[in-house]
Amino acid sequence: MTQPDPQTGSEPAKSGGDFHVFDTTLRDGAQMEGLRYSVADKLAVAELLDELGVDYIEGGWPGAIPSDTEFFARAAEELNFKHAKLVAFGMTRRAGSSAAEDPGFQALLDSRAPVLCLVAKSDMRHVEQALKTTPEENLAMIADSVRTGREHDRQVFIDCEHFFDGFRHDPEYASLVVRTALEAGAEAVVLCDTNGGSIPSDITTVVTDLRTRLEAVLPSERVRLGMHAQNDTGCAVANTLAAVQAGVMHVQGTANGYGERPGNANLFSVIANLETKLGLKVLPEGGLEQLTRISHAIAEIANMIPDEHAPYTGHAAFAHKAGIHASAIKADPALYNHVDPAVVGNDMRILVTEMAGRASVELKGRELGIDLSGDKAALDRITKRVKELESKGWSFEAADASFELLVRDEVEGGLPRPFKLDTYRVIVDHDPTAVTVAEATVRLDVDGERVIATAQGNGPVNALDAALRSALAARHPRLAELTLSDFKVRILAGSKGTDAVTRVLVSMSDGESEWTTVGVAPNLIEASWNALADGLAYGLNRRGHSKT
Ligand SMILES: CC(=O)SCCNC(=O)CCNC(=O)[C@H](O)C(C)(C)COP(=O)(O)OP(=O)(O)OC[C@H]1O[C@@H](n2cnc3c(N)ncnc32)[C@H](O)[C@@H]1OP(=O)(O)O
Ligand SMILES: CC(=O)C(=O)O
């Protein structure tokens, strides 16, 4: 790749060429508080990252962390990457020894990983106070470790810990560390903002100065630098891009930005920005479209809730709520999307709330397969109803099914209702010697016939659900396929504190898709009933109206 010129701001090259995307989800990402992968999890994440098309996957630190040693042993047998190379992370050999005799270094070779990434000290203060050795011995540790790795046919990367702080403190020494590693045969030297305290202008200044120093003593093609940014200033992605624009050709980061403290550079944002903003094709063909899927799949394996608001991959990354936005999107989605969401495998969504205008309602209708264009009167009525209901605590943005029921009420006289409620009654029976049970009785009008059913449950809503299903089972056997997948309650403070209302969101599934309805009432059971009854009615009608 031709490096962009930071002085002239010339355009970066259009192809990634020998640019590296280096993922450290399984090593640095695993240093995140609250995150713990099993070996099987790590194998699954590595496979997903290879599918995405990253060039290097750092799997952990064999020899230091027992489960990482096991991961590398299993990876050597079980993983068959299409594109990526597996990397074993470790540190340069200990002071006063040799890499050949250092047991830690030997464990890296034993891991059978074809690539090593070794952390090295580049800040003089760390050499003196943490390593407690001399500047010369630190350089010898780096050179010896790189050469020994190369002698064993390994590609070797050097991660220069605290590089930016070290360079500001002593630029001569920090540059000498990088030069020593490159001269010893390192594939690239990665500049780490370990404390994450830098901002983009710091990165540009340091990388530019460093390149000038190195290119004065080395051929420019040998000055191969990388960037590893922590997110302590919230600038990790911006810092990585600044480094690329200043000439680095290797970027490190983690899936969804997982990592120690506030995390690492979110590699998915970095990749998307490199491809769509800097014109660098860094993934194989088709990779970028997998970004959203792979981001969510890794979150699931990591047992983390996917970040709804993550750039590019979040569920809300292309969700538009404001009426004015929707009205422009109606003319052309590009007016409010910085890129086409499909490029990263995501979707645009229109949210209908009290901030909606007619355009939002029309676009949302289109998403649900209902053409409202040209029906100004219906658009006015629906927009007005949404605003009124939202002001009373309803929330349609998370309840598409309730919005669809409302729209169909307005334009089609409503979906056929499988039942009409006459009354219900719920009793909760607390017995200190037994499990508390709830009993519900419902009286319904089903196709003109009165049906009464009673059922028990572990709580009032569960009992109501069971009674309703029992009343309808004979006429609607498909009810058995509809399961309750989520139930959320929120108490909304009223104006005087005592007049609070309850909002319930009920999500249901028929095994193929999921839909959500909302109910609002001063009473928890009433709000739940409303959401539940609408959810079941919607589900029973679903085959006829396929989108939620
Ligand atoms: C910035 C980063 O995120 S780097 C990655 C950090 N990750 C981890 O630390 C996770 C895994 N770490 C571990 O399991 C352990 O810390 C081990 C196995 C590596 C070392 O454990 P111990 O031998 O008990 O040493 P301890 O953790 O107390 O201290 C680190 C030692 O490594 C030395 N060291 C630190 N960096 C380097 C380096 N780049 N090269 C050589 N030696 C180093 C320190 O001087 C210290 O030496 P000492 O044992 O003589 O005091
Ligand atoms: C190596 C590394 O993870 C860091 O310096 O942040």
Image (cartoon, grey):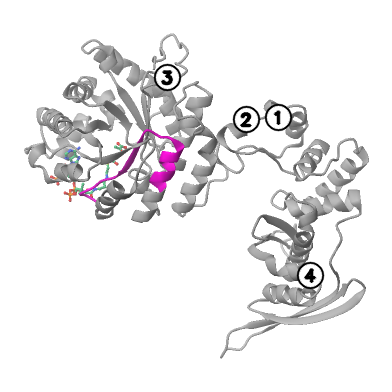
Q: Where is mark 3, residue-wise?
A: 245
Taking the view exactly as shown, the residue that stands out farthest to the bottom is 433
Task: Please name which of the two marks, 3 or 1, marks the residue nearer to the observer.
Answer: 1
Give the amino acid type for the residue marked by disc 3 in the picture. Gln
Q: Where is mark 4, residue-wise?
A: 476
The image quarter containing residue 476 is bottom right
Q: Which residues are magenta?
A: 45-65
Nearest the viewer among 44 and 435 is: 44
Give the amino acid type for the residue marked by disc 2 in the picture. Asp
Give the amino acid type for the residue marked by disc 1 in the picture. Pro
Task: Please name which of the two marks, 1 or 4, marks the residue nearer to the observer.
Answer: 4
Identify the residue at horizontal 45%, vertical 30% (top origin).
283
**In the rendered image of this protein, does residue 166 appear above or below residue 466?**
above
Q: Are marks 2 and 1 in contact (CB under 8 Å)?
A: yes
Residue 454, given in percent of the width and then of the height, sits at: 76, 82
Residue 421, given in percent of the width and then of the height, sits at: 85, 71
Q: Where is mark 1, residue-wise?
A: 333
Callout 3: SS = helix
> Label 3: how many residues lie within 10 Å, few (<14), some (14-19) or many (20+)?
many
Give whichever of discs 3 and 1 has the lower sequence position. 3
Mark 1 vs mark 4, CA separation in Å? 41 Å
Task: Please name which of the two marks, 3 or 4, marks the residue nearer to the observer.
Answer: 4
Give whichever of discs 2 and 3 has the lower sequence position. 3
Q: Respond yes or no on whether mark 3 lies under 8 Å from ligand 2.
A: no
